[in-house]
Image: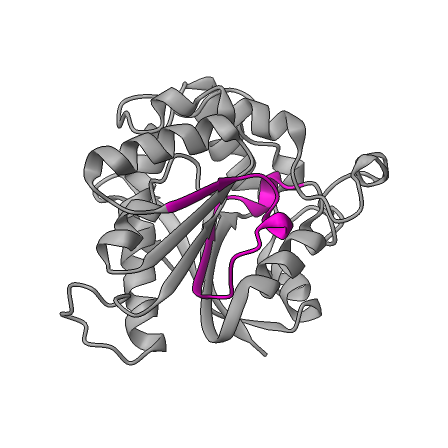
Amino acid sequence: MENATVSPETGSSPETRAAAPVGATIRADEAAHFGALAREWWDPAGSSAMLHRLNPVRLRYIREAIDAHWAGDIHARRPLGDKRALDVGCGAGLLCEPLARLGGAVTGVDAAAENIAVARAHADAMGLSIDYHAGELAALEDGPFDLVTSMEVIEHVADKGAFVHALSQKLAPGGLMILSTPNRTARSRLLLVEGAERLGMVPRGTHDWNRFIIPDELEALLRAAGLAMHNLRGIGFSPMRGLELSDDLALNYIVTVTRD
C-alpha cells in the first residue's frame, strides 16, 4: 500500500499541533527556508527551476478550469477581465503574474516577507499591478475573490484544517478555487524527496514527505469547510514530454474546488 497514515487534519505530530497558535497556519521554519531562496525565484536555472517547469502545466489546468467554470470563450486573451484573483503562498509571483496577464485583479499573499519584496520588484519591472501582502492569510482584510489559487502550499502549513477554512473564507459565492499538492505515496517519497533533493533538483529541506496529503484527506478537509472537490488530475513526468497533466496521481495532483 503506497499511502501512509498522517493526521488528515494537520498532517503533523501532536507536538507540532500544540505548538501552533490557534488560527495560525504559517510555520516559521518553512517561511525562513523559502525566504532564503527569494532572490532565485525568477531564475529558471536556479533553486526554483522545478517550479518554472511546473508552472505551464498548472496554467494549462487553470485556464481550462476558468473557461469551464464561467463558460468563457476559450480563445479570449483576458478571461479574468472582470474577476478578482488571490494566490495564497505566492512566493515571488510566478503564478500571480500570468493571472494578471489573463486580466485578473490579482492579490498575492506569502509567509515570507523576502518573497513579497522580490515579487513587488519583479511586477513593477514587468509593468504589472499586483497587490502583494506578507503574513497570515487570515489576517488579509481584502476579499472575497472570484478565483483563489494555492499551489504546493498546503503541505507546508502548520494546521491544514485552519488553512482550508481560511481559504474558504476568501472564496466569493460562485467562485472557483484551484489547489495542487504532492501526494503522499512511496513513489513521491522516492522521486520528489529522496531523488530530487539528492540530485539538487530542489533545495534540501524543501519537502517533508510526512506532511504530504493524499486526495481523500484533502477532500475531507474541504468538505469540513463546506467545499466540494472536482476534476482531480495528476501531474506526472514523461521522459519524452516532461511534466504534464496525467491520470497518474502518484506524484502531484491538482483539483478544482467550489462551495458545496
Judging from the image, the colouring scheme is one colour
- Indicate left or right for 31 with 4 as reference: left
Percent x, y for residue 85? 40, 59
Q: Is residue 62 visible?
A: yes
User: Would you place residue 27 above or below residue 147 in this image?
Assistant: above
- Indicate left or right for 94 with 218 as reference: left
Q: Residue at x 55, y 23 (%)?
A: 33
User: Would you place residue 151 above or below residue 71 in this image?
Assistant: above
Q: 189 or 26, which is in the foreground?
A: 26
Q: Residue at x 65, y 38 (%)?
A: 26
Q: Residue at x 70, y 41 (%)?
A: 158
Q: 130 or 58, which is in the foreground?
A: 130
Percent x, y for residue 48? 37, 28
Q: Residue at x 18, y 72 (%)?
A: 74
- Classify residue 45 by image quadrant: top left
Would residue 141 be counted in the magenta stretch?
yes
Q: Which residues are magenta?
A: 131-157
Q: How many marks?
A: 0
Percent x, y for residue 248? 42, 55
Q: Is residue 249 visible?
A: no
Dividing the image into 4 quarters, which one contains the C terminus?
A: bottom right
Q: 110 or 259, which is in the foreground?
A: 110
Percent x, y for residue 222? 63, 65
